[in-house]
Image (tube, helix red, strand yellow):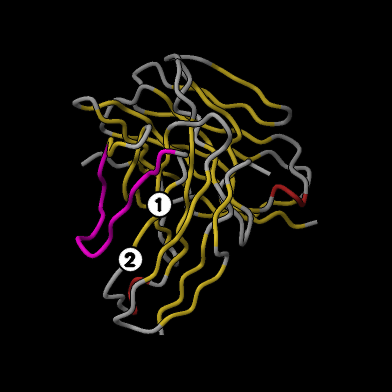
Amino acid sequence: DSGVTQTPKHLITATGQRVTLRCSPRSGDLSVYWYQQSLDQGLQFLIQYYNGEERAKGNILERFSAQQFPDLHSELNLSSLELGDSALYFCASSPRGHRNTEAFFGQGTRLTVV
Amino acid sequence: GQQLNQSPQSMFIQEGEDVSMNCTSSSIFNTWLWYKQDPGEGPVLLIALYKAGELTSNGRLTAQFGITRKDSFLNISASIPSDVGIYFCAGHLTQGGSEKLVFGKGMKLTVNP
């Protein structure tokens, strides 16, 4: 158990809909990262938050957005869903400090768009 | 953008054999990380490398951070069936005040008992 909690574990929704994925980082971790993993693809970095502020942006679509709340949990919002958005979405967290690059991953949310 | 080239893409080995996998990049990274992902699970950190030339072991795993900071390898000795999974390398860098973790596409390991 990495200490990172993601909900829900599975989500099935229709095209055009909007969903919210939730992540609770490990206790004390200030950084949260979101990744997308499609079939046969590696992990694609979407976005990172640090202590409530956006820190880095990757290949995140404009239809997607995220935020980190004062209690440090984070949500990833996916809207106007398309079939190609079906993927595993992972959240990872890391602590602040010298070794703040050791990111620990949650078990992921499997999103299926039908 | 930064890319990590991971090779080989897959390997089939017999239980007890050693296996080696590689990761290279044209970019310089501050840190190299190796992760393992089991089916239906999130990646789990195996080894983190912070200094160029650093050699680190974790049980049967040994990893090295290349002296140029552009490559890394991971060795698994005396493989066992539970070593099956996908192994990812990841490089961390800081650019313009923002941090990036870049992942390779993974190496799928199959261990035959």
Q: Which mark is residue A35?
A: 1
Between residue B99 and residue A71, name the one nearer to us.
Answer: A71
Q: Amino acid at mark 1?
A: Tyr
Q: Residue at x 57, y 64 (%)?
A: A9
Image height of A6 relative to A104, above or below: below
Count how many numbered circles sit on residues in the image.
Answer: 2
- Estimate the x, y position of residue A58 in percent, counting from the top left: 26, 47
- Estimate the x, y position of residue A4 in percent, counting from the top left: 58, 44
Which region is colored magenta? A56-70
Q: Residue at x 74, y 51 (%)?
A: B14
Judging by the rendered image, the residue that carries numbered circle 2 is A78
Chain of the residue under the numbered disc 2 shown in the image: A
Image quarter where the N terminus of chain A lies is top right
Q: Residue at x 38, y 84 (%)?
A: A14
Picture quadrant of residue A62: bottom left
- Estimate the x, y position of residue B64 in percent, counting from the top left: 52, 23
Q: Amino acid at mark 2?
A: Leu
- Comparing marks 1 and 2, which lies closer to the viewer? 2
Q: Secondary structure at mark 2?
A: strand
Image quarter where the C terminus of chain A lies is bottom left
